[in-house]
Amino acid sequence: MRKNKILITGGAGFIGSHLCQRLLNENYFVICLDNFITGNLANIKPFLKNKNFRLEIKNVSNYIDVPGKLDYILHCASLASPTDYLDFPIQTLKVGSLGTHNALGLAKKKKAIFMLFSTSEVYGDPLVHPQKETYWGHVNPIGVRGCYDESKRFAEALTMAYHRVHKLNTKIVRIFNTYGPRMRHNDGRVVPNFIDQALKNQPLTVYGKGNQTRSFCYIDDLVDGLLNLMNSKENLPVNLGNPDEFTIMELVDLILKLTGSRSKKVFKKLPQDDPQKRRPDITRAKKILGWKPVVPLEEGLKRTISWFKS
């Protein structure tokens, strides 16, 4: 029997590589497409000898074609950390617009199921809390974060247009803060930043007073939700994240405790348009996908810290 063939754009990144691993374990044929602007070859090196895995070094923002049948296209490619999209704002806008258009065009050609990896950042600095999928967001389109936020909002609009006009079977996942092994040490996101600084006994950089909140989902939980959505009949956006809400200071103190670090805290000015609150309403994910996260923050951080040490 023919294996289901799946293309993952950005497959060498943090989330993409975990998806590659899980799908290979579940007997899919996986094609990983990445241009390595932020992806890491080490993330997928263990899969390169697997006969059911193929690496394509390509930029999805340029025209792409893949010979043969494709059953699924998961458009995961993105510059998702503040460090990356501040350094590469034009590439960020391109992968969200041109990259999404190219991936959707390929899905239409192959009659493949398409899933867009969107983000909680479509909600901006929210005026509604927690954030439901029905909330339209509060985003500064010309601010420094606009390149990421608006690229994802455009990508969602384009995906729904392909669904409505071309009857393409599309999925949209809005991913809230996710963490775990394979995050880059210099990623720029809060969990790897704090862990890296703590393990080196360097000052932990806290922006503002540290009272802004985030909700942290462990990568294994996220991948479970992604696969459930991929195989569902749902076409409207679905939030995936952990609804447990923590202040940045609570995260700092927990990481200091778990690492036994001697690091001190250093406070810096809050970045422009930094969201003050972030917490998903996952009612739809529970109802439609039968999904909820199960890994508590402390347990997930222990696993992540262990990986960073190694």
Image (cartoon, rainbow, N blue to C red):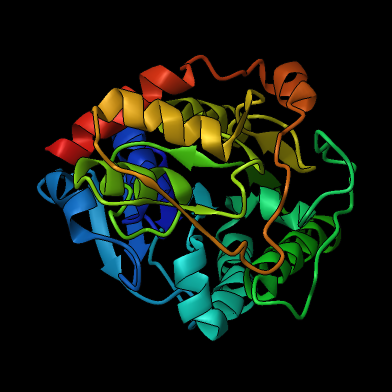
Q: Quadrant of residue 140?
A: bottom right
Residue at image location 24% in from the left, 37% down from the top? 262
Is any atom of residue 105 visible in this view? no
User: Where is residue 281 drawn, in percent x and y?
Assistant: 77, 29
Q: Quadrant of the C terminus?
A: top left
72 left or right, relative to 301: right
Q: How many marks?
A: 0
295 left or right, relative to 129: left
Q: Quadrant of the N terminus?
A: top left
119 or 72: which is nearer to us? Answer: 119
Is any atom of residue 81 visible in this view? yes
Q: Quadrant of residue 230?
A: top right
Q: Residue 253, relative to residue 116: is it above or below?
A: above
Q: Quadrant of residue 96?
A: bottom right
User: Where is residue 254 drawn, in percent x and y?
Assistant: 42, 26
Residue at image location 45% in from the left, 68% down from the top? 83
User: Where is residue 291 drawn, in percent x and y?
Assistant: 62, 18
17 left or right, relative to 160: left
140 or 173: which is nearer to us? Answer: 140
88 or 264: which is nearer to us? Answer: 264
Residue at image location 46% in from the left, 17% down from the top? 295
189 or 3: which is nearer to us? Answer: 189
User: Where is residue 39 drawn, in percent x and y?
Assistant: 32, 62
Q: Residue 305, relative to residue 84: is it above or below?
A: above
Q: Residue 252, relative to residue 121: is it above or below?
A: above
